Image (cartoon, rainbow, N blue to C red):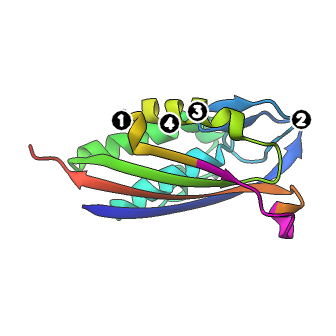
Amino acid sequence: MRIGIGYDIHRLVRGRPLILGGVEIDSEWGLKGHSDADVLLHAIGDALLGALALGDLGHHFPDSDPSYRGIASVKLLEKVMEMVRDQAYTLYNLDTIVIAQKPRLAAYIPAIRRNVADILATDLGSISVKAKTAESLGALGRSEGIAVHAVCLITQDSR
């Protein structure tokens, strides 16, 4: 078994779609980034890469590479899952916390969990997505951005 920890944060800006877990959230604010800035999928990718000791998303998909401009983070996470399978591992479980003062995410959590489970080709029961506010403290509490913490456990396949 191997454990990985992931973290990501992006600034909220007007005029961009807000994508979390590959699901578009109804909001006038979106996340700024080179890709679609899906902070949840980025943290998950970093957790998986960390469990494999393969660095982070920026190492594999640098923002200096124009081919990743505007890319859907779903595609990046699918490539990370190929790395997991190539190393003969399977995702056992994933736990995430999305820290966002706004918008409220509770209504979106079921769809996000289903989508993440589909992307990772695993059971819904292996995926946890929780949404918390920052209690109006700091930059996240002022709704300047959204951050995500992710922890995963992967197990070696018995091939």
* Measured Cα–Cα span from mark 4 to mark 2: 23 Å
* Measured Cα–Cα span from mark 4 to mark 3: 10 Å
Which quadrant is home to the N terminus?
bottom left
> Height in image: 148 above or below 67?
below
Dividing the picture into quarters, in which one does residue 16 lie?
top right
- Identify which residue, 60 or 32, lies in the foreground: 32
- Tell me the kind of residue under disc 4: Val
Q: Secondary structure at mark 1?
A: loop
Horizontally, is 53 left or right of 113 in the view? left
- Of circles 1 and 3, which is in front? 3
* Measured Cα–Cα span from mark 1 to mark 3: 15 Å
Q: Is residue 60 visible?
A: no
- Tell me the kind of residue under disc 2: Glu
Sequence-first disc among 2 and 3 = 2
Residue occupying image coordinates x 60% and y 50%: 130
Name the residue tied to disc 1. Answer: 122
* Measured Cα–Cα span from mark 2 to mark 3: 21 Å
Residue occupying image coordinates x 58% and y 32%: 110
Indicate the position of residue 88 as horizontal and vertical percent values.
Answer: 20, 47
Name the residue tied to disc 4. Answer: 116
Horizontally, is 51 left or right of 72 in the view? left
Q: Are marks 4 and 3 in contact (CB under 8 Å)?
A: no
- For label 1, count other residues whose C-alpha is less than 10 Å away and answer few (under 14), some (14-19) or many (20+): some
Sequence-first disc among 1 and 3 = 3
Name the residue tied to disc 2. Answer: 28
> Height in image: 103 above or below 108?
below
- For label 4, count other residues whose C-alpha is less than 10 Å away and answer few (under 14), some (14-19) or many (20+): many
Name the residue tied to disc 3. Answer: 110
